[in-house]
Image (cartoon, grey):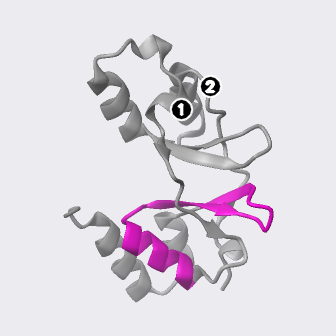
Amino acid sequence: MKVKDVMHKGVVSVEPDAMLAAVAAKMREHDIGCVPVCEKIGKPLGMITDRDITLRAFGSGKDVAKLTAKDVMTPGLVYCQASDEAENAVRIMESKQIRRLPVLDESDKLVGMLALGDISSAMAQDVTGEVTKAVSAHHA
């Protein structure tokens, strides 16, 4: 089974200079917990999660009204390719302890998102349990 067969298509993303309030509003509007940060051409630069907003923005002591996505995003995006086997994407999620994995096409443009829920809906129960346990383990 390929990632493209399991992933959510039509991912919501933001540009690096998007104001943090707009990022949070977009998350609320779409009922999502993370948003990839992409250049205008669709190339991903990083990821911003609701946790990043809470800890890096509000916890920083900086003026939150002036912060942008780039200020609080996690750079160095971990991703998979749409053409990858879903099992390989699961191994990436396990090894990096991440719950959501951006999916890129052959041009390295964002085309989807693979989340734990997608895995649990499409793959065997033992794989689902294994990846959930791995990503939920305490970081060392």
- What residue is pinned by disc 2? 17
The amino acid type, in three-letter code, at marker 1 is Lys
Left or right for 59, reference 112? left
Magenta residue check for 116:
no
Q: Where 53 sits versus 131, above or below?
A: above
How many residues crowd mark 2 within 10 Å: few (<14), some (14–19), many (20+)?
some
| Residue 33 in sight | no
> Disc 1 versus disc 2: distance between alpha carbons?
6 Å
In the rendering, at what x and y percent does residue 115 appear? 52, 62
- Please state, as top left, top right, bottom left or bottom right, where the N terminus lies in the image: bottom right
Read off the magenta span.
Answer: 87-113
Quadrant assignment, res 6: bottom right
In the rendering, at what x and y percent does residue 82 appear? 71, 71
Query: Residue placed farthest to the front in the image?
Result: 76
Q: Earlier in the sequence, mark 1 or mark 2?
A: 2
Q: How many marks?
A: 2
- What residue is pinned by disc 1? 70
* Label 1: element kind: helix
Mark 1 in CB contact with mark 2 (< 8 angstroms): yes
Left or right for 4, reference 17? right
